[in-house]
Image: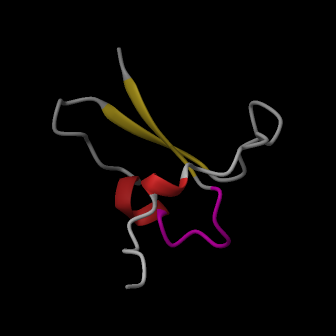
Amino acid sequence: MVIHTLYNFSKGEDSKPVVDGKEAADGNDFKYIKNPQAMADKPVLKAPLAQLHSTPSEK
């Protein structure tokens, strides 16, 4: 059995009604986790390459 899980990392529970008591399109249940724990440390990310920015350069 597959269970789709919504991890709520936001303040409040506004997202709970989206999945609470609902069934996914594939017929499996949803599970709502109110206060999830992080599964790893916060990643350290490098700045993206300049050519990946979508803002066109000034002319």
Residue 39, image quadrant: top right
Residue placed at 79% from the left, 42% from the top? 44
Judging depth in this view, the residue of 27 and 5 nearest the camera is 5
How far across and how far down the image is residue 36, in percent? 71, 44
Of all residues shown, which one is farthest toward the front?
A: 59
Residue 26, image quadrant: top left
Establish if 28 lies above or below 47: above
Magenta span includes 44: no
Of all residues shown, which one is farthest toward the right?
A: 41
In the rendered image, the quadrant that contains the C terminus is: bottom left
In the rendered image, the quadrant that contains the N terminus is: top left
Establish if 46 lies above or below 14: above
Establish if 55 lies above or below 15: below
Of all residues shown, which one is farthest toward the top?
A: 1
Say whether residue 34 is left or right of residue 30.
right
Residue placed at 55% from the left, 49% from the top? 49
Residue 18, image quadrant: bottom left
Say whether residue 27 is left or right of residue 15.
left
Residue stretch in magenta: 9-15
Labels in figure, total: 0
Judging depth in this view, the residue of 56 and 22 nearest the camera is 56
Q: How was this image coloured?
A: secondary structure
How far across and how far down the image is residue 53, in percent? 45, 62
Q: Main secondary structure of the magenta part?
A: loop
Say whether residue 47 is left or right of residue 29.
right
Residue placed at 68% from the left, 71% from the top? 11
